[in-house]
Image: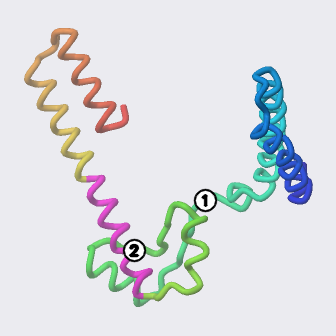
Amino acid sequence: MASPEEIERKQKSVQPLLEQLAQETDADRVQELGKQIAAIAEELARMAQGLEKTYAPEAWGSGETRVALTKDQRQRVAEATGVALDTLVLQGSETWDPQMPTMSPATIERLAMASVADRKLKEEKRKAAKEIVKQLEAAVGDDPAPETRAAIDQFKRDHLGE
């Protein structure tokens, strides 16, 4: 794995080539410089990917931020939504983790309520889509036209993930 210093040195090594490229008028030389710059850029990309794998958020965990709600927060969320929630799970730890130390308890509570509302909405959409499929299949019978079957199957993929 390359160090950040090595990557920086490699980046700086491209500068003279770029300056030559800006001054060059010979087409063959321009092409040659372009190939050299492209090769260095590819090497830089590989070096950066190695560094990224070392420091990537995936190396630290699941990519989600989990917040345990207090007893009072759990009670208020349950009263507002009708759902008992012990832990708020937020996707995208790289976004949420830095904000957590300064986030107010009221904001965490609102996020919990929004999370429950989002989950309920998804469940209701899924129920509605299942009902639509049931009605469509009943309407077309046991032997629908291939185009009709394809349309129903596409609806299932789009709305039910089947």
Mark 1 or 2 closer to N-term? 1
Question: Which callout, 1 or 2, points to the residue nearer the camera?
Answer: 1
Residue 113 magenta-highlighted:
yes
Residue 120 magenta-highlighted:
yes
**The one of 118 and 68 positioned closer to us in this rendering:** 118
**The one of 154 and 78 positioned closer to us in this rendering:** 154
Q: What residue do we see at 28% from left, 60% from top?
A: 120
Q: Is residue 71 left or right of residue 96?
A: left
Name the main secondary structure of what is drawn in magenta: helix
How crowded pointer 2 is (Cα within 10 Å; few <14, some 14-19, many 20+) is rated as: many
Q: Which residue is mark 2?
A: 112
Magenta span covers which residues?
106-123
Q: Which residue is mark 1?
A: 63
| Among the 4 quarters of the image, the one containing residue 57 | bottom right
Q: Is residue 103 left or right of residue 29?
A: left
Q: What residue do we see at 29% from left, 31% from top?
A: 156
Q: What residue do we see at 77% from left, 42% from top?
A: 45
Q: Where is residue 5? Give x, y as percent.
A: 90, 59
Tell me if residue 124 comes above or below residue 153 in the rendering. below
- Which amino acid type corresponds to the residue marked 1 in the rendered image? Gly
Tell me if residue 140 comes above or below residue 111 in the rendering. above
**The one of 111 and 13 positioned closer to us in this rendering:** 13
Q: Where is residue 97? Give x, y as percent.
A: 60, 72
Residue pushed farthest left?
A: 139
Q: How many marks?
A: 2
Q: Where is residue 155? Give x, y as percent.
A: 25, 30
Q: Where is residue 130? Give x, y as percent.
A: 22, 38
Secondary structure type for disc 1: loop
